[in-house]
Amino acid sequence: MKSWSYTALERGGRTVSGSMEAPDEAEVARRLRRAGSVPLGIVPAKASLFGGGERLSGRDLAHVLRELATMLGAGQDLDRALRFLVETAASGRVRRVIEALRASVRDGSPLAAAMAQHPRSFPRLAVGMVRAGEAGGTLGPTLERLALLMERQQALAATIQSAMIYPSLLLLAAIGAVVLLLTQVLPQFVPLFEQSGAALPASTRFLIDAGDAVGRDGPAALAVLLAGLVAARMVLRRPGPRLAFDRFKLRLPGSGGLLREVLAARLCRTLGTLLQNGVALVPALAITREVLGNAAGVAALDRATEAAKSGGGLSGVLAESGAFPVRMVHLLRLGEETAQLAQTALRAAEIHEDSTRTATQRLVALLTPAITILMGAVIAGIVSSLLLAMLSLNDLAQ
């Protein structure tokens, strides 16, 4: 199948543009005519640098699902709901994706199949839930739950990112201030020290040498650091190193607990939503593994999936991995014992999302004063070394 971009004239006289997956140009034209449109131009879609096709951001996807659920809940049919989304799209990228969906749906394709043609925009989670909703005749409520899931995921990620902005900026400012003192301020005093011939304190000599090293080797060191980061990223694409690194992150003091809370929130929210929507346990686990974002968690969930296939429980296998909080394991065990795994998983998701927000606030509350104190101590040390050197010059003059 190839991707084609088209421009067509609808029955009402409006010109529309979109993309479609089809074997050839003639098939695209045939589908457009069958939908009641007149093809004006059909060309192969340009492949993007990272694999071709439009891509919706997480925020765009959540907005599209929410609007679609609202329109269907208001009694609109799917074609009219998609047309409304096309007309109110916030950007050309979103408009092209929805136009492609609408073209596929008007061609007789189910919404889930149309979404599956755009894997860069619609993850397997969304496709699986929509397929289950279409099969059960509950597409509107399914989209409502899916939109809520996406919005919660975006809100959780935004909470963590927003909380880390201030400590990150503070750390950059601290590093910049130290570099500025070593490379710009301190060299102004070096000629004065050399002319006096006085013996400088050890701390002052150390700072002068450090400033020379930063000014001379700083660009090269930065280039080496960037190259090392690129190399490390390439190495971490391999399954073995990635698994070891993700396990190491979960064991870190402080941040490891936060990462386990995030992992538990993702697993429980996704699994509970899928089960509540009628997806069977094993397919739900297969979809859930794709949203975890941690190789250690994925490995544990894979073992739990194998146990589920043989009739075993999830909680025992997840507990052995050590990748998830104990609270989550106990709640899932309770859900299995009471045959209410979906409801219990969703309740666990709320608990771990709250724990994530609390842990993030605590981490920021610790990082901010720690960085401030460290920055003050370093700058005070530099200033004190300069004052000691100036006092030695004063003693020599007397």
Image: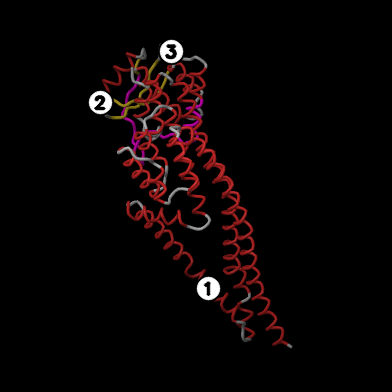
**Residue type, mark 1 in image:** Asp
Which callout, 2 or 1, points at the residue further toward the start of the chain?
Answer: 2
Q: Nearer the viewer, residue 326 or 7?
A: 326
Q: Which residues are magenta?
A: 40-66
Report the side of 372 relative to 242 (left or right).
right
Q: Residues within 10 Å of mark 1 (few under 14, many from 20)?
A: some
Q: Nearer the viewer, residue 64 or 213?
A: 64
- CA gap between label 1 and label 3 equals 71 Å
Q: Quadrant of the N terminus?
A: top left
Q: Which residue is under mark 2?
A: 23
Colour scheme employed for the rendering of this structure: secondary structure
Q: Which residue is under mark 3?
A: 13
Q: Which residue is under mark 1?
A: 212
Please provide percent x and percent y for residue 321.
39, 50
Of badges 2 and 1, the one in the foreground is 2
**Residue type, mark 3 in image:** Gly
